[in-house]
Amino acid sequence: MSTALLEVRSLEVVFDGFRAVADLDLTVDEGEVRFLIGPNGAGKTTLVDVVTGRTRPASGSVRFGGRELVGMAEHEIVHLGIGRTFQTATVFEQLTVVDNIDLAANFRRPLRSLLRRRRGVDERVRVALDAVGLAPLADEPAAVLSHGQRQWLEIAMLLVQEPKLLLLDEPVAGMTKEERTRTGELVQAIARQRTVVVVEHDMDFLRRFAQRVTVLHEGTVLCEGTVAEVQADERVQEVYLGRGGGTRHGPEAAAVGPGA
Amino acid sequence: MRRWSGHAGFVAAGAGLLVVAPMLLSDFRLGLLAKYLCFAIAAVGIDLAWGFGGMLTLGQGVFFGLGGYAMGMWLKLQDAGPGGLPDFMSYSGLEEVPWFWRPFSSGWVALSAAIVLPVALAVGLGFLIFRQRVRGASFAILTQALAAAFVILLVGQQRYTAGTNGLTNMKQLFGYDLDDPTNQRSLYVVVAVALGVVYLVARQLVKSRYGRLLVAVRDGEDRVRFLGYNPTKVKTLAFAVSAGMAGLAGALFVPVVGIMSPALLGVVPSLELLIGVAVGGRATLVGAVLGTILVNYAKTGLSEQFASGWLYLQGALFIAVVAFAPRGLAGLADLARRRRPSRAERPVVDLAQEPVTGPALEPAK
């Protein structure tokens, strides 16, 4: 049943002599929901950046459905069917909510067909608006949205593009408890039809919604498994509890410990 | 409702320019207004590139000049007659018309070149510059350098370009005497209509999906890439349209004012084209037009009173706008209009505290 959709092989990323990612291998199967966790600086976002073409690796390969992504431009990768959100949701504040989604929806159309005005709201745009519950705010500028609503708008913009693979970078960071639950259920609903990779710190969120978890540490994969397996892994505890792992990840360490 | 008020505004402005102004203004003043309208055409283009696209183009004089020289070359060749040599060429010892002048003996070639040349240059430059992700101050400096280089080229190639003097003393256009006030009045109408067309084109672009995309690129170029669009194309298109408009403005300027010279397209004139947009309010097309007319009117008025004072005032004006009214007159007008009633209407405050709108959680099946 499982065919590999995303294959990362011996990836190495260097920033100014600092190796952010080293010898990283990762395989994500089609239809999977994969969580990426790890302390700050483990290379989670860097990995997402490489997959989406934002960062060029020093060496290694990233294949998506068999096609090499390294060297492709960001927008070309989007056209292959990979979409992403950002840690701090970035939407176009000067545009209305519906225009934000409409823009995302029409990315496959040639530029010249965009020279006409939008008449009404496309059906798929309406569906995406409803899915994230922003329909009542459709004609407001995105600038008025709260932090949580911006994340949902980003997710709607992703959904309407119908990507095969979604990369969500900390989708619940800074959200209230209630917003987290809603986002989690939204991610679950999305994952029914697509492959999703979620970068997340929030352990509570992880326990509730993760199937498989990959733990990154110092730019490489530390271990992989179910939430329970990962939590029981000694090396993970070591990294998070700080025996040689540093003191900067206090709150997360507490959350991932075996008793938590 | 808004749509109708927009149409009414356009019709009113058209009536004002085409009927009222010619009735009220002397030949001299109407000629000046025609000149301002030429600048306004270029300003609409700048507004597209800068106001909506975030490309601070300080070299618009290059495109204005290409259009102007294309037109000027044609008029000079016409005055010289078939086989004749434009006056400045014979002074500088040329025996025959250089090859790159020859196509401009046809009016239609010259008129289309006035737009096609700037567009082609902008497309070429745009692809090179934007693909390298040059933007912001670097882009501004690059375009400014371009304006400076263009002037040096024109001045240096005196035999072919008439150097510092520029192309002057043009007598006729399509056989009409350019010194005849009646013809100048007709020319004014042509310029006003051209401005109307340019405005409508820009408006269509701005209101279209492409216009939204352009604003998105301005506010988050990198984010747009992850939506699957190539910002290079988006920006190049706006830059090319703005160059075409500047070219048209330059071409119209020549018969109206009767001269095209390097002094009209260097660094300072390129900046002056921008000031009107800044004063009127960038990212509003009406603001760009009104701002440009206003600033140029003020320039004429003040230069008539104290010749050297204008430069300082212009600088002060620019600083004042940037510091205190970044959205220009249009921004101030907006502010005045909203002052009173809107506090209660504005939804901004409520939304943050309203937890009701969130994802609908029914399974999507």
Image: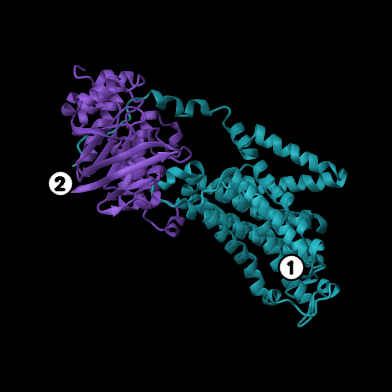
What amino acid is at disc 2?
Answer: Ser
Query: Residue at label 2?
Result: A2
Q: Which mark is residue B72?
A: 1
Question: Hey, which residue is sitting farthest left in the picture?
Answer: A1
Amino acid type shown at disc 1: Gly
Q: Nearer the viewer, residue A4 or B60?
A: A4
Q: Residue at x 65, y 46 (%)?
A: B277
Secondary structure at badge 1 equals: helix
Residue sitting at the far bottom? B83
Residue B251 is situated, as x and y percent measured from the top left of the image, at 69, 64
Which lettered chain is shown in purple? A
Q: Is residue B142 above or below residue A182?
A: below
Q: Is residue B178 left or right of residue B271?
A: right
Q: Nearer the viewer, residue B299 or A221?
A: A221
For the point 46% across and 56% down, the residue is: A115
Marks 2, 1: nearer the viewer? 2
Is residue B248 visible in this depiction of the protein?
Answer: yes
Q: Chain of mark 2?
A: A
